[in-house]
Image (spheres, helix red, strand yellow):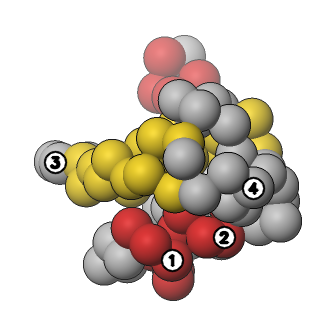
Amino acid sequence: MITVEVVLAWPDRADTRRLTLPEGATVADAIEAAAIDGSAQCPAVAVHGLLARPDQMLREGDRVELLRPLLADPKDNRRRRARAGS
């Protein structure tokens, strides 16, 4: 058995689940077992900050991070800030 953490962060809170899964469990297994509301709307997932595939096998202590869609384009935000600073 391995212990992993699944996290979905929001601007004002974070939903976290610590799970004990069988050896050989995948990212998809962890997401399903965590059953965090809103996880189906997450377009990507990372393990310790690195993009991961659903079939990636997990190891003891891994942190699975559900990545929410961006609300704004970071490039547009930088341009807006640059124009405001001129």
Pointers 1 and 2 in contact (C-beta within 8 Å): yes
Could you tell me the amino acid type at mark 2? Ala
Quarter location, residue 37? bottom left
Of marks 3 and 4, which one's residue comes earlier in the chain?
3
Could you tell me the amino acid type at mark 4? Gly
- Residue at 48% over, 17% down: 85
Most distant residue in the top direction: 86
Of marks 4 and 1, which one's residue comes earlier in the chain?
4
Disc nearest the viewer among 4 and 2: 4
Is 53 drawn above or below residue 65 in the view shown? below
Of marks 3 and 2, which one's residue comes earlier in the chain?
3
Residue 32 - label = 1
Disc nearest the viewer among 3 and 1: 1
Quickly name the residue at label 4.
24
Q: Please say whether residue 45 is visible from this viewpoint.
A: no
Could you tell me the amino acid type at mark 1? Glu
The 10 Å Cα crowd at callout 3, few under 14, some 14 to 19, many 20 or more, is few
Residue 12 - label = 3
Residue 31 is situated, as x and y percent measured from the top left of the image, at: 52, 68
Residue 79 - label = none
